[in-house]
Amino acid sequence: MRKPLIAGNWKMHKTLDDARELVTGIVDGVGKLGASDGVEVLICTPFTLLFPIAKALANTPVMFGAQNAHEEAQGAFTGEVSVPMLKDTGCTHVIIGHSERRHVFGEKNDRLAKKVRAVVDAGLTVIYCVGETLDEREAGKTREVIESQMGEVIDSDVLADRLVVAYEPVWAIGTGKTASPEQAQEVHGWVRASLASTYDKTTADGVRILYGGSVKPGNAAELLSLPDVDGALVGGACLVASDFIAIISAAAASVPA
Ligand code: PGA
């Protein structure tokens, strides 16, 4: 059984005071739900917040992570942050290959492969993002794009226990448009098939595949009920504690008793 993971991607939002308030709301909400046995909850904050958030989350079930990392451990890379530096904060997860990294910052599969390896080899869990643009979908290329994003980045040396994949159609991120349940399930099935060909079926069946792209309290239950959707990567709705908690609650309700 794959335990659902609800991950919040804060992107470039929140200064310290606002962050503390949001974290308090999330921790209180998770406590009231009592959902931490059935659902894993993660927040991925800006780098500047990692140390204070580590303190705020101590002795709570909420995990924290980063949104990017450089592939090298150290060096002359002005403005970058390495995985060993992230490990110092006590964080457990790093998002790699988010569509904004791919499309705004030009990160390509060959570089993302190095980043994924750096995260996993350091003992952290990677949330590796894949997803097609609207043009690619309309040109009928979705499967091809997803398979190359998977095949060129995830090889069998990447420890599957430390891998989470997030399918985020680029056209659904921050737009209010969501993939239909059929579209989401179809792509999640392709991701799982790609994992099965890289590893084997049993290993592929153990890897969580999150859906992301305008996940909200109102659509979370339907998406999370799909057989190959094992959680959500949430952007906008994770910045409001009550919305994020409602999504966690939907995930808890999706777990068979
Ligand atoms: P969104 O963002 O929920 O605001 O669409 C999701 C993401 O970019 O991870």
Image (tube, rainbow, N blue to C red):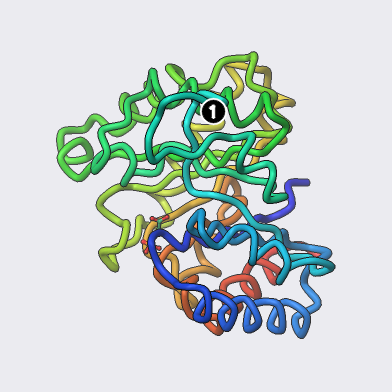
Q: Quadrant of the C terminus?
A: bottom right
Front residue of 256/8: it is: 8
The residue under the point 25% across, 52% down is 171
The residue under the point 39% across, 48% down is 168
Image: 12 above or below 170: below
Query: Quick one: SS at disc 1?
Result: helix
Q: Position of residue 72 (x, y in %)?
A: 51, 23
* Quadrant in the rendering for residue 29: bottom right
Amino acid type, residue under disc 1 in the picture: Val
Front residue of 109/253: it is: 109
Q: Position of residue 235 (x, y in %)?
A: 43, 63
The residue under the point 51% across, 44% down is 95
Image: 186 above or below 7: above
Residue at the spot of label 1: 116
From the viewer's perspective, tell me whether residue 102 is left or right of residue 246: left
From the viewer's perspective, tell me whether residue 212 is left or right of residue 90: left
Q: Position of residue 11 (x, y in %)?
A: 41, 59
Q: Position of residue 48 (x, y in %)?
A: 51, 59
Q: Neighbour class for label 1 at 10 Å: few (<14), some, many (≥20)? A: many
Instruction: Report whether residue 138 is seen.
Output: yes
The residue under the point 43% across, 26% down is 112
Ligand 1 sits in which quadrant? bottom left
Front residue of 111/37: it is: 111
* Quadrant in the rendering for residue 207: top right
